[in-house]
Image (tube, rainbow, N blue to C red):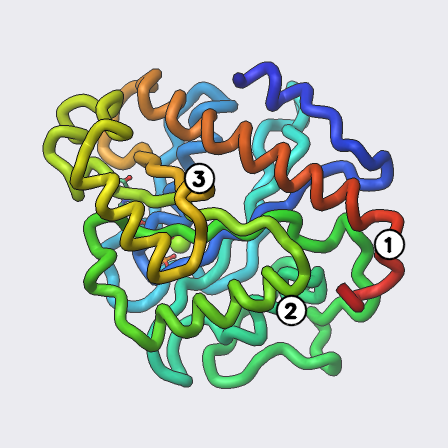
Amino acid sequence: MISELRDFNIGEDKVEQLNFLLYGPIGAGKSSVINTIKTIFEERLYVNYLAAEGSTSQTIYYKKCEVGNSKDGFLPFTFNDIMGVEKGNQCGVHTDDIISTLKGHVKEGYQFNPNSPLTELNLYYRKNPSMSDRIHCLVYVIPADRLSMIDEDTIQKMQRVREEAKRMDLPHVIFMTRVDVACPITKKDLRSVYKSKKINKKMEECSVALGVQKSCIFPVKNYHEEKDIKEDINCLMLDALTKIVHWADDYVVKYSSKLSSSEL
Ligand SMILES: Nc1nc2c(ncn2[C@@H]2O[C@H](COP(=O)(O)OP(=O)(O)OP(=O)(O)O)[C@@H](O)[C@H]2O)c(=O)[nH]1
Ligand SMILES: [Mg+2]
């Protein structure tokens, strides 16, 4: 799976990397997903210095994360980390900013402002994004153990983004993190994740809450306190990655010729 992903050929020459946006409540594990992916492909543990059980988002800048290095080359995909969603109008990432991000309007380094969305006047606003600037797959990151704690307002914000993704025909999936915290059997043996009734129930709840079909929900575990590389963690994440890379590629191929501006 690693070599297949490393050598993945995007179906459209003009697009060099497939862009994924990680989106979800604060502390859901968005930054940890990136660290897990970097750990898998770069074969050394990445830790999240900022990962903390805070009440406000630890990630405030829009950051595009490449996987790999200049010596061995970069992988044909990027993961974009953003601030978490929170309830209320003044908290967390603004829903309009997420939609602008999906369309490729937000430049890297932009500091999200919960009070007001990015406008065309801002230096970080890209007026005419190309297919390469756009997001090619939206990845919701939802913590399995805190599903019931996500408030209605946050769910509604995420649903609004999903409606927009649907309108754009953009693939959207869920990475359900912290499965080890949610289920003791899974914690003991990650291989039993798909056999766990508890996890299955959580996947169903996620599916109902966000309207994402179950085949697009991937239970994953992130590296967080491990001291070594674990094959089970890698396999689960790589299986999810392989699927979403193909779906993102399908989107790029389908819309590259049709897209001339941000009309999508
Ligand atoms: N046990 C366990 N802990 C996890 C997992 N994923 C993330 N964590 C922990 O959950 C906490 C939050 O993770 P982050 O990656 O910082 O979450 P985030 O979504 O980036 O949070 P913000 O940027 O603040 O919105 C950290 O303490 C992580 O170590 C997982 O799969 N299992
Ligand atoms: Mg983060």
Residue 217's spot in the image, x, y percent? 40, 43
Foreground tag (2 vs 1): 1
Q: Around disc 2, counting alpha carbons within 10 Å, would you say few (fewer than 14), some (14 to 19), or many (20 or more)?
A: some
**Amino acid on which disc 2 is placed:** Ser
**Amino acid on which disc 1 is placed:** Lys
**Amino acid on which disc 3 is placed:** Ser
Q: CA distance from mark 2 to mark 3?
A: 27 Å
| Residue 100 numbered mark, or none | 2
Of the pair 103 and 229, the residue shown nearer to us: 103
Query: What residue did someone put label 3 on?
Result: 215
Q: Is residue 238 above or below residue 153?
A: above
Q: Quadrant of residue 196?
A: top left
Of the pair 85 and 53, the residue shown nearer to us: 85
Q: Earlier in the sequence, mark 1 or mark 3?
A: 3
Mark 3 residue's CB less than 8 Å from ligand 1? no
Label 1 residue SS: loop
Residue 118's spot in the image, x, y percent? 62, 77
Query: What residue did someone put label 1 on?
Result: 258
Q: Residue at x 30, y 49 (%)?
A: 204
Q: Residue at x 34, y 16 (%)?
A: 231
Q: Around disc 1, counting alpha carbons within 10 Å, would you say few (fewer than 14), some (14 to 19), or many (20 or more)?
A: few
Residue 136 vs residue 181: left or right? right
Residue 162 vs residue 170: left or right? left
| Residue 78 numbered mark, or none | none
Residue 119's spot in the image, x, y percent? 68, 81
Q: Earlier in the sequence, mark 2 or mark 1?
A: 2
